[in-house]
Image: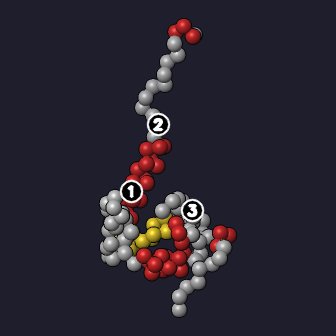
Amino acid sequence: MPRRIQDDPRDMREGAGQWRAAPRPVDWHARREAVLARDQVCQWPISYDGTICGSTDRLEVDHINGNTNHELWNLRALCQHHHRSRTGQQGGRAAQAKRPKRQRPPEQHPGLL
């Protein structure tokens, strides 16, 4: 029996003890099944002409824009390799944004002191 996707699951989330920055909705398993049934292959673009990876090995569900919107249009199937690569890129950008800048602030002109 297929699982049911809730119409408005925003008020029903996973427990606060999860490791995720944004908790998944309670009906996440139904959404995951729906996305994998819709896409069936890895949707990672490998060229500018629209060619995609197409792998069917170890598919996972990825958020396209932000990890708080769990609408089906914002989810896609990626193979494990491309999902880990994308997650690593996002983590690297987030870590770099937290680091202090290495440049000195510009000095004020002596005539303006």
CA gap, disc 2 and disc 3: 27 Å
What SS does tag 3 mark?
A: loop
Q: Quarter-wise, where is residue 14 in the image?
A: bottom right
Q: Nearer the viewer, mark 2 or mark 1?
A: 1
Tag shown at residue 100: 2
Type of residue at label 3?
Answer: Thr
The mark that comes first in sequence, 3 or 1, is 3
Colouring chosen for the image of the structure: secondary structure
Q: Is residue 94 left or right of residue 27?
A: left
Residue at horizontal 49%, vertical 64%?
63
CA gap, disc 3 and disc 1: 18 Å
Question: Which residue appears farthest toward the bottom when viewing the image?
Answer: 1
- Vertical position of residue 105 compared to residue 61: above or below: above
Tag shown at residue 88: 1
The mark that comes first in sequence, 2 or 1, is 1
Q: Is residue 37 left or right of residue 112?
A: left
Q: In this view, does 82 lie to the left or right of 101?
A: left
Q: Where is residue 7 in the image (x, y as percent from the top left)?
A: 65, 76
Type of residue at label 2?
Answer: Pro
The answer to whether mark 3 and mark 1 are in CB contact below 8 A is no
On the question of residue 19 being in view, the answer is: no
Tag count:
3
Tag shown at residue 68: 3
Residue at horizontal 56%, vertical 68%?
70
Which quarter of the image is occupied by the C terminus?
top right
Residue at horizontal 53%, vertical 69%?
73
On the question of residue 2 being in view, the answer is: yes
Q: Quarter-wise, where is residue 46 in the image?
A: bottom left
